[in-house]
Structures are given as C-alpha cells and as structure tokens.
Image (tube, rainbow, N blue to C red):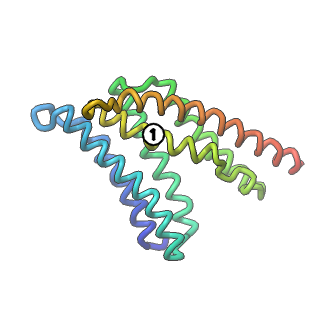
Amino acid sequence: MQLNWPNLLTWLRIVMIPLFVGVFYFEQHWMSHATQNLVATVIFTVAAITDWLDGWLARRLNQTSAFGAFLDPVADKLMVAAALIILVQLGRIDAVIALIIIGREIAISALREWMASIGRGKSVAVSMVGKVKTAAQMIAIPMLLYHDRIGGFDPDYWGTWLIWVAALLTLISMGYYLKMAWRAARTQG
C-alpha cells in the first residue's frame, strides 16, 4: 500500500465514520439535538469534500494507485451507508430509501467485481445518471442531517425531495448497469 495524500484522505474518511455515528450517542445534557445535527452535518460534509479532494489530488499529483482505486469507493459507500442508517434511525428517511441506495451499491460493486473478473470491467463504467444520483444524495444527506430550519429555508423538506430523486436515479442507474453487464456477458459467451 502506497501512503500518499490521496490515500491518507481516504483513510481519514474511514476514521470519520465512527465519529460521525458516535455524535448521535452523546447524552443530551452533553450535546443537544441541534448540536448533534450540526456536528454530524459538518463531519459528513468534510468527508464528502475529502472524497472529491483525494481524487483530484491523485490525478493532479499523479498518485493514483490500485489500492486507492479500491479503497476510495469503499470509504464512500461506508460513509453513505452509515448516514442513511442514522437517518432511518432518526426517522428522517424511510427505510425503503436506505435499502434501495445501499442495496444498489452492494449489487453494483459485486457486478463490477464479476465483470472485471471476466475482463469486461470497462463495460460497467460510471454513467452520467450515476454521477447525478451521487450529487443528489451528497446534497440531500447533509440537509437531512442538519434537519433544522435556516431562516426561511427548510433543509428537511428539500433534503427529503432530493433523497427521493436520488433513490429514483439509483434505480435508473442500476437498470443501466445491469443492461450494460447483460450485453457484455452475452458477448462473453
């Protein structure tokens, strides 16, 4: 494993996961609900920024590695899954949304692994729908974590709409990936 800035940022994101989850287990006399919401939102947002930053640094500094390419999406999926589970526990999203998004991530990861094993990994490259889905969920999750109104802006309302859009795009992108994999598998014989 090569230890460079991009990989260190990815490891930082993984270390942030228990901190992020732990915020919601502090006693109320130590940290109010509003403070829990704010701290969790900040941690998740920093993690999302490091996700973008580690990819940018890897390309910019020419420090891409097979290990980084493996670990980066794992860190992303773990952070998103942790956030979705917390949001279900808090009653801010429906469990169906979490199941759709987490289930799709597991299925597509397995699909990519299988396609790579038969030499067709490029057949399931990231699509534009997948990128828009990721953007929608990465905007929705901090809004749902923060939850409290900011003046006339209701992050919970808009976050709920966006997470439903992300869930719909999740299903669409999963269909796209399955279609591409099916075509590639049929030509494989």
x and y percentages locating residue 145 in the rendered image = 33, 36
Does dot 1 land on a helix, a strand or a loop? helix
Q: Is residue 9 left or right of residue 21?
A: right
Between 176 and 71, the residue placed more toward the observer is 176
x and y percentages locating residue 78 in the rendered image = 45, 46
Q: Is residue 144 left or right of residue 66?
A: left
- Binning the other alpha carbons within 10 Å of mark 1 as few (below 14), some (14 to 19) or many (20 upward) gives some
x and y percentages locating residue 44 in the rendered image = 35, 46
Judged from this view, the residue extending furthest toward the front is 152
Type of amino acid under label 1: Ala
Q: Is residue 20 left or right of residue 81?
A: left
x and y percentages locating residue 171 in the rendered image = 63, 33
Which residue is at a point 29% across and 30% down the rendered structure image?
152
Which residue is at a point 46% across and 58% down the rendered structure image?
52
Residue 178 lies in quadrant? top right
Dot 1 corresponds to which residue? 81
Q: Is residue 23 left or right of residue 142?
A: left
**Badge count:** 1
Residue 144 lies in quadrant? top left
Between 71 and 161, the residue placed more toward the observer is 161
Which residue is at a point 46% across and 24% down the rendered structure image?
95
Judged from this view, the residue extending furthest toward the bottom is 61
